[in-house]
Structure formats: structure tokens, C-alpha cells
Image (cartoon, rainbow, N blue to C red):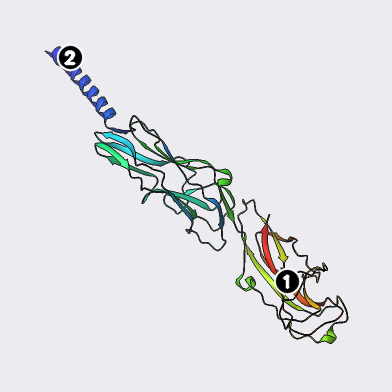
Amino acid sequence: MSSLITKYSKILCIGLFAFGASSGAYAACRAPEKWTQVTAMLDIGKLNIPLESKVGDILYKKSVKPLIPPLIPHICKNGGSVSFRITKDSGLAPGFQKVYTTDVPGVGVRFSWGRTIIPYSGFYSEGSWSIPAADMFTIEIIKIADKTGSGPLAGGIYAEYSGDGDNKALIRLMLAGGDASVITTSPCIVSNESKFVQVPLGKIPLSTFRGVNSTTAGSNFKIRLDCNVSAKSTINTVYLKFDANKKDPNGRDGVILLDDSQTSAKGVGIQITDSQQTPIKFGQDTFVGPALNTYDLNYTARYIQTLNTITPGQANGTAFFTIEYK
């Protein structure tokens, strides 16, 4: 009797084990036999990050709709799980949820499918399930630190959608890398008072001029730059360049011709000099310094006699400057 019971027990155990294994393999979400992998390219092009942006700001957002027609990504028999997982995981950004760091310092990335932020996982009951063609896949570039750097976002697959039955990637979110997604941080901002500088030169008696190239005392002005760039950035040196639409045709350094009007003076121009009283050179980059400091750049504007004869009148001129980084 005991041997019969033992034998029966063994048969019962084997039957239960086989049933359990069969049920586990059957309850899953799989790709259909004729399935087509879909790739959503989410390259952002060239993105410049202004220095005044704040941590948590969404710097860029792009959505694509690659599913035409609607995709039937999986068939679930007896139910199963699907997931949209992050595959290029460089770590979560500190203080953020579902935002991941990138190769560019201070810059994070977040992906979403419709209103669902990736990563995502869910259980589906029995049946076949489709993703509507209207569903959008989105990339967001987020500022995750006070200091941000510059450089390309690495290429590759960032997220994949699959079922638990075969783990075949049916949808992929990708970046091409290289020049397709490049982030640049503006290391410096021009202070508000320096964005448009008016330099009053006052009323100057004709007797002040003593011949061609003679100059007046002039008035001082400054350009203030606030610079703050990540030490890992490839852009870390600041240059300033002056230019003007109406430069002296005789090639005098730093000389602007006067604005045209019926009341404009004749025979004089405006000359800009640096802090050493050396005339600036238009169109030439001038070294400022590392992009890690605040700079007060001092200049002087003065009148200069350009012709043998001066005709009194209004004497206004315009120059502009650009900040460049290397």
C-alpha cells in the first residue's frame, strides 16, 4: 500500500510540474508572426543652452509619430506583461524622476510614449493589442545642474518596447549621434546694461580739433560679461569682436563713420579705444579670458578728425560687438 501511495505521489508531482511549466510559457505577450520593428529617430539638431536657464527647465522638446498604420505589437495569451525600458542607462539624474544623465554635463534626457513617461511596464489581459498611429514618442532635454557643458549626445538605442514572451524589440527610440544632436552652452551672458550702450560725447568746440587724426578726450563705457561654464566643456575661452556697418574707408583702426542725416557733421568720425587707449581693430577677435569669470571690459569713445575741413552738426555713430568662444 505504501508503495502504491508513493508511486501515485510521484505521478501526481510530475503532472503538476508539467502543468506549471506549460502554463508559465503560455501566459505571455509575444510579437505576432509578421511583425515589423519601428524606429523613432529623435535627434534634436543643434541646441544652445542660455546661461540664464534654471535647473529643471525643459530646454527642448520634440515629438514624432512613426506608427503608420497602427502597429499590433503583441499578442497576449492568458495575459502577459509588456515594457518600455531604458536601454542606454547612464544613471538617473539626482533629484529627478525618470530623467537620465547624458554625456553632456548638466544635461538630462527624458522619453515618453503619449502621456506615459518611460520606463514603463504593464500587464495586459488576453487578446491582441495595438498602438494607435496617433501616439507620439517624445524626447525632452532638461537642465539638471547649475553648470552645463557642451558636446554631442551619444548615438544609439535609448529605449525599447517588448513583450515578456520573446523580448523582441518592436519599437526603438534612437539618436543618431555625431552632429545630429549637439548641445552648446553659452558660457557668458552680457549684462542688461551692456546689451545696448549709449555713450554721450557732448558738444565739442571746433577749436578742439587741430588737424586730421586729432582726437577729443572722449567718454568711457564698459561691457560686462558674466561667464560660468562647466570645466568639462570644450568651449572655455572668451573672445570679443567689434564691428560696424560704416567703417572708415581710409582704414583707421576703430573709426566709425557718422550716421547719415541732413544735419550730420562732416569731417569727423568716432573712434573706439581699449583700456590702454589703443584703437580697436574691427572684425578681429580680442582675447578676454577663461569662461569662468565676470569681466568688466573698459573702452573709450572719442571724436577723431578725418578730413581737413569740419562742418558742424550732429555726430552720431553705431558699432556692435559679438562674443565668441573657442
User: In the rendered view, does 108 fall on the left or right side of 27?
Assistant: right
Residues 143 and 219: in front is: 219
Q: Quadrant of residue 210?
A: bottom right
Disc 2 marks a residue whose amino acid type is Lys
User: In the rendered view, does 298 fall on the left or right side of 116?
Assistant: right
Residue topped by disc 1: 298
Report the residue at 80% width, 83% height from top.
Answer: 311
Residue topped by disc 2: 7
Quadrant (top left/top right/bottom left/bottom right) for the N terminus: top left
Residues 80 and 64: in front is: 64
Q: How busy is the neighbourhood of tag 2: few (under 14 within 10 Å), some, or many (20 plus)? A: few
Q: Quadrant of residue 84?
A: top left
In the depicted structure, whether residue 262 falls above or below residue 74: below
* Spatial separation of the CA atoms under disc 1 and disc 2: 100 Å
Q: Which of pointers 1 and 2 lies earlier in the amino acid sequence? A: 2
User: In the rendered view, does 125 fall on the left or right side of 121?
Assistant: left
Report the residue at 67% width, 62% height from top.
Answer: 323
Kind of element beneath mark 1: strand
Disc 1 marks a residue whose amino acid type is Asn
